[in-house]
Image: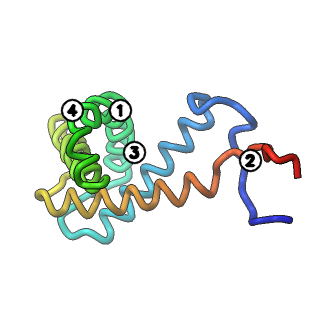
């Protein structure tokens, strides 16, 4: 019985393969582009800022997200995961700050813009990750 159509792009490789890293960069870029189109306080003025902003966002998430989750673990548990959205907003604001330091045309105008932008990016990332996840063999064999 088929449950749907899934696209397998990684050829069974690890999540750190070059194909998966490029795919994650494209997913982040599409999330940033959609967030800049829907949220009034997020500004991505050109494609160079989008690509560089996506790369900075990936680096910030790779380096700071585990630390932020570790430091805010009690708040995440106490708020039933809602505080993850606050952490994601802070990571997006950090990305905008770093892009501004590099002179890129990428800006976030405040907490609420970062909050809703991070929410949109998270939803895009979730949907895209479900759509391109590797197909795993069923444990039941049937």
Residue 77's place in the image compared with 130, above or below, is above
Q: How far apart are marks 3 and 2 (CA)?
A: 29 Å
Quadrant in the picture for residue 14:
top right
Viewer-nearest of discs 3 and 4: 4
Q: How far apart are marks 4 and 1 (CA)?
A: 19 Å
User: Mark 4 or mark 1: which comes first in sequence?
Assistant: 1
Q: Is residue 137 left or right of residue 98?
A: right
User: Residue 62 location, x and y as percent?
Assistant: 37, 31
Residue 102's place in the image compared with 1, above or below, is above
Viewer-nearest of discs 3 and 2: 2
Q: Distance between the residues labelled 1 and 3?
A: 12 Å
Residue ID for mark 2:
135
Q: Give the class, few, some or many, for how many residues have Cα within 10 Å of label 1's Cα (few <14, many ≥20).
A: few
The image quadrant where one finds the N terminus is bottom right
Q: Give the class, few, some or many, for how many residues have Cα within 10 Å of label 4's Cα (few <14, many ≥20).
A: few
Q: Is mark 2 on a helix, strand or loop?
A: loop
Pick whichever, 117 or 99, lies toward us: 117
User: Mark 1 or mark 2: which comes first in sequence?
Assistant: 1
Residue at x 59%, y 30% (from the top left corner): 18
Render colour scheme = rainbow
Residue ID for mark 3:
51
Q: Is residue 74 left or right of residue 35?
A: left
Q: What element carries label 4?
A: helix
Residue ID for mark 4:
71
Residue ID for mark 1:
59
Please say if the residues under marks 3 and 2 sit with CB atoms less than 8 Å apart: no
User: Mark 2 or mark 4: which comes first in sequence?
Assistant: 4
User: Residue 113 location, x and y as percent?
Assistant: 19, 62
Pick whichever, 79 or 62, lies toward us: 79
Residue at x 62%, y 36% (from the top left corner): 19
Q: Distance between the residues labelled 1 and 2?
A: 27 Å
Q: How far apart are marks 3 and 4 (CA)?
A: 29 Å
């Amino acid at each position: 019985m088929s449950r749907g159509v899934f696209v397998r792009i990684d050829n069974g490789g690890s999540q750190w393969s070059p194909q998966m890293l490029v795919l994650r960069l494209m997913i982040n870029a599409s999330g940033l582009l959609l967030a800049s189109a829907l949220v009034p306080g997020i500004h991505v003025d050109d494609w160079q800022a989008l690509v560089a902003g996506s790369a900075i966002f990936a680096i910030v998430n790779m380096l700071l997200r585990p630390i932020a989750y570790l430091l805010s673990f009690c708040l995440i548990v106490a708020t039933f995961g809602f505080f993850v959205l606050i952490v994601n907003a802070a990571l997006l604001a950090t990305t905008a700050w770093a892009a501004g330091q590099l002179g890129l045309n990428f800006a976030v105008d405040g907490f609420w813009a970062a909050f809703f932008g991070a929410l949109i990016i998270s939803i895009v990332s979730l949907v895209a990750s479900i759509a391109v996840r590797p197909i795993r063999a069923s444990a039941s064999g049937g």
